[in-house]
Amino acid sequence: MDGTLRDAGGAAAITLAGIGKRFPDGTQAVHDLTLRIPAGQLVVLIGPSGCGKSTILRMINRLIEPTSGRILLGEEDVTRVDPVQLRRRIGYVIQHVGLFPHQTIRANVGTVPRLLRWSRDRIRKRADELLDLVGLEPARYAKRYPHELSGGQRQRVGVARALAADPVLLLMDEPFSAVDPIARGRLQEEFLRLQATVRKTIVLVTHDLDEAVRLGDRIAVLSQGGRLEQYAEPAHLLGAPATPFVQEFVGTDRAIRRLAVTPVAPDLLAPPDGPGELPVVALGTSLYDALAAILVAGTEHARVVDAAGQPVGLLDRRRILDAG
Ligand code: ADP
Ligand code: MG
C-alpha cells in the first residue's frame, strides 16, 4: 500500500526491522535494532550519550542512510520514498530548534506548507491555528521574530512548525533539554495536552528519565551501539527492569518514580468507612500524589472517591509503599 505517505494527516505506525548503521570510519553506531511503534503512541528512546539515539531518528527521516535493515512507515519502506518528500511528512524537532532568524514566527511555522505550495490564506490559517495549539496567541506572537521569544517559546514554535503539514510521524531529539527545569516541566505538560489532541506517532529522544517516564506511552532503553535493553511501559520498566543495565539506569529512586506513574486503582483499596477527617483523593490520582496527601494530613489513610465524588474505599499508606 503506497497511499500512507502521500495522504498526510493521521498517524502511521513505524517499524524498525533489524536496522544498523556503520559509519564510513568504522563506527558501528547502531547494531541490529528491531522496534515497533504503534500509530498514535509516544515512544521515548533513552540511553547514555553516544548510544545511537540521534542516529536512529536520522535514519527514520533519512538524513542518515541505514547500512542494514528496513524501516517501514505504515506499510511502506521509507528507503523507497524520495527523501525530500518523506521529510515533508515527518515532523522533526531538535534541541536548538533552528528557526529562521529573519522570518516571522508565522512564516517559520509555515515553512513546510509553503514548500507544499499551499495558498497564502491556507498557510496563514494553519500557522495561526498551530500557534494557538502550542499556547502562543497569534495576535501577539505571529509577527514577532525568533529573537523576541524566550527559549521555551522558541521550542513551542519548533513544535508548531513540525506539525504544520499534519505529519504522520513526529521525531523529537532532546526537544526540551536546553530550557531551564521549570520551563521544561511546563513544556512537557503542554506537550502532553497537545498530543492528546493531535494523537501523532511520536519518537522522542531524551537522556532524562523523569521526562521519559512522564511523557512516554512506552520507553525503549538503549545501551551503546543502539542495543535495545528493554521496551516497556514506564511503570513496568520501573517495576521490573529487564537487565542489570536497565536496573542501574533507572537507579535507586525508581520506587518514587513508579508511584508517580501508578494510579490509585480499586484493587488497592479497603472498603469505605464512615465519615471522619481523612484526606480525599480521586481514583486515577497518582499514588505519589495520594501519598503526599496522606503525609500532609498526618493520617494513615486517604478516602478514595470516584468521578462522581462517591467514596469507593480507603487507601492505606502501607499499600502505597508496597506498590512502590
Ligand atoms: P546519541 O544521540 O545517543 O548521543 P549518536 O547517534 O549521535 O548518539 O552517535 C552514536 C555513535 O555514532 C557515537 O559513537 C558517535 O560518535 C557516532 N557517530 C555519529 N555520527 C557519526 C559520523 N557522522 N561519523 C562517525 N561516527 C558518528
Ligand atoms: Mg543525540
Image: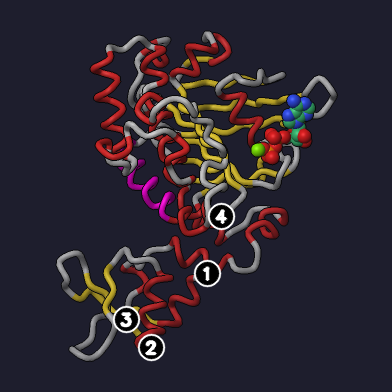
Locate residue 45: give its quadrant. top right
Q: Amino acid at mark 4?
A: Leu
- Do callouts 2 and 4 mark residues in contact (Cβ within 8 Å)? no
Where residue 228 appears, as percent x and y from the top left, is 66, 41
Label 4 belongs to which residue? 237
Q: Nearer the viewer, mark 1 or mark 4?
A: 1
Q: Nearer the viewer, mark 1 or mark 2?
A: 1
Q: Amino acid at mark 1?
A: Ile
Count neighbours of disc 1 (C-alpha within 10 A) and say few if under 14, some if 14 to 19, many if 20 or more: some
Q: Which circle's residue, 1 or 2, is located before the other in the chain? A: 1
Which element carries disc 3, helix, strand or loop?
A: strand
Which element carries disc 1, helix, strand or loop?
A: helix
Q: Amino acid at mark 2?
A: Glu
Locate residue 57: give its quadrant. top right
Q: Which circle's residue, 3 or 1, is located before the other in the chain? A: 1
Q: Is residue 63 left or right of residue 120?
A: right
Q: CA distance from mark 4 to mark 3?
A: 27 Å
Which element carries disc 2, helix, strand or loop?
A: loop
Q: Is residue 230 left or right of residue 43?
A: right
- Quadrant location, ligand no. 2: top right
Q: Which circle's residue, 4 or 3, is located before the other in the chain? A: 4
Q: How is the image coloured?
A: secondary structure
Task: Please say whether residue 193 is one of the residues in the magenta stretch.
Answer: yes
Where residue 59 appears, as percent x and y from the top left, is 62, 24
In the image shown, does 142 or 302 lie closer to the viewer? Answer: 142
Residue 227 visible (yes or no): no
Tell me the number on the disc at residue 302.
Answer: 3
Q: Residue at x 38, y 24 (%)?
A: 107
Label 1 belongs to which residue? 256
